[in-house]
Amino acid sequence: MNVLTAPRGREDRKVISMLEIVDIATGERTLLGEFDELIEAPNWTADGKHLVYNSNGRIVAFDLSTGTGKAIDADYVDDCNNDHVLSPDGTLIAVSHHTKEDAQSRIYVFPIGGGEPWLVTPIAPSYLHGWSPDGKLLAYCAERNGQYDVYTIPLKGGVEKQLTHTPGLDDGPEYSPCGKFIWFNSVRSGLMQAWRMEADGSNPTQMTFDDANTWFPHVSPDGKTIACITYAKGDVQPGDHPPNKNVEIRLFPAEGGIPQTLVKLFGGQGTLNVNSWSPDSKRLAFVSYRMK
């Protein structure tokens, strides 16, 4: 979930965005490029050739072979935030776009090569995070009647289904590759932690027990490993994930275990909001920042 296209705290300062990848076995970081503008939340395309991120409201495809980016033409969908996901077959992208009538986030889908978008969630705000492996459902965080919960909806739109009902923020829903589970993060235990439930919303199970705030559990394509971003306890409110913080990217086994730090960086909002695993499950893409 991201309530502003430009994360809070950056509006009056110059941001330098650094697009990076990290090898999960060695921890080696590779800088792909520095940008004199805000870029956020890279997705890795299924063919491994591009990273897709948002910048200035547009979705940009970054060619890993040339180191250049090109905005994807999506007509009037031009105020996208950092909640966007690629379809399992790689042909479509779903985005969270702030519509002009009320500046609230709604989910749209359009071809990955550009083209006419269609509206999926007329009710706002809705923040996309997951796509079912069979391509039929989208999973998202939405505020309804003052409460943020996890919902799913058919790809072409229709009746949304509420999956969580516990008081407090539930966010970041993402399907496991097998389609059996949806991972999400929740404050229901006090601090923000990673949880897993059946795809129909049943049997919610806490998966991390950190003395820290754990956000956005992302499942590797092979289904074995979870990547998440962690804020220090006391550095943020459990229900908030701001920019401009010292954070960590951590990994833990999908069946449970103690998260281990992979990367320490300055970032937070925009760093790892959506799944950014490489197709071979060996690397992660992320964005770090520095301020001028």
Image (tube, rainbow, N blue to C red):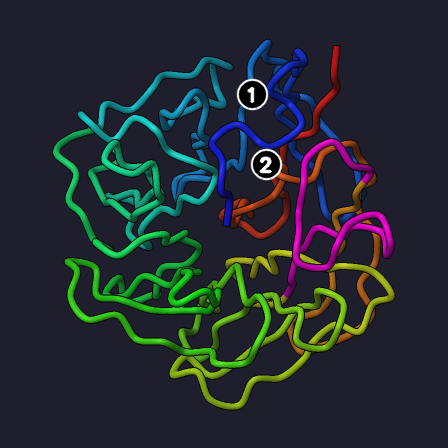
Residue 145: x percent and y percent? 39, 67
Q: Nearer the viewer, residue 24 or 98?
A: 98
Residue 61: x percent and y percent? 39, 25
> Residue at (55%, 48%) from the top-left corner?
277
The C terminus, quarter of image: top right
The mark total stands at 2
> Residue at (48%, 38%) from the top-left corner?
82
Part of the protein shown in magenta = 225-246
Residue 53: x percent and y percent? 46, 31
Horizontal side, residue 245 vs residue 101: left or right: right
The residue furthest bottom is 203
> Residue at (63%, 20%) from the top-left corner?
17
What kind of residue is marked 2?
Gly
Report which quarter residue 263 is drawn in: top right
Q: Identify the secondary structure beneath mark 1.
A: loop
Q: Where residue 178 is drawn, which disc sits there?
A: none
**Which badge, 2 or 1, comes first in the chain's sequence?**
1
Q: Is residue 50 magenta?
A: no
Q: Which residue is mark 2?
A: 270
Q: Which residue is mark 1?
A: 38
Tell me how far mark 2 sits from mark 1, CA to CA. Answer: 9 Å
Report which quarter residue 233 is drawn in: bottom right
Instruction: Look at the numbered discs 2 and 1 and tell me whether their residues touch, using CB distance below 8 Å.
Output: yes
Q: Nearer the viewer, residue 177 or 26?
A: 177
What kind of residue is marked 1?
Leu
> Residue at (31%, 51%) from the top-left corner?
87
- Classed neighbour count for the residue bearing mark 1: other residues with Cα under 10 Å, few (<14), some (14–19), many (≥20): many
Residue 143: x percent and y percent? 42, 61
- Classed neighbour count for the residue bearing mark 2: other residues with Cα under 10 Å, few (<14), some (14–19), many (≥20): many
Q: Identify the secondary structure beneath mark 2.
A: loop
Horizontal side, residue 72 vs residue 206: left or right: left
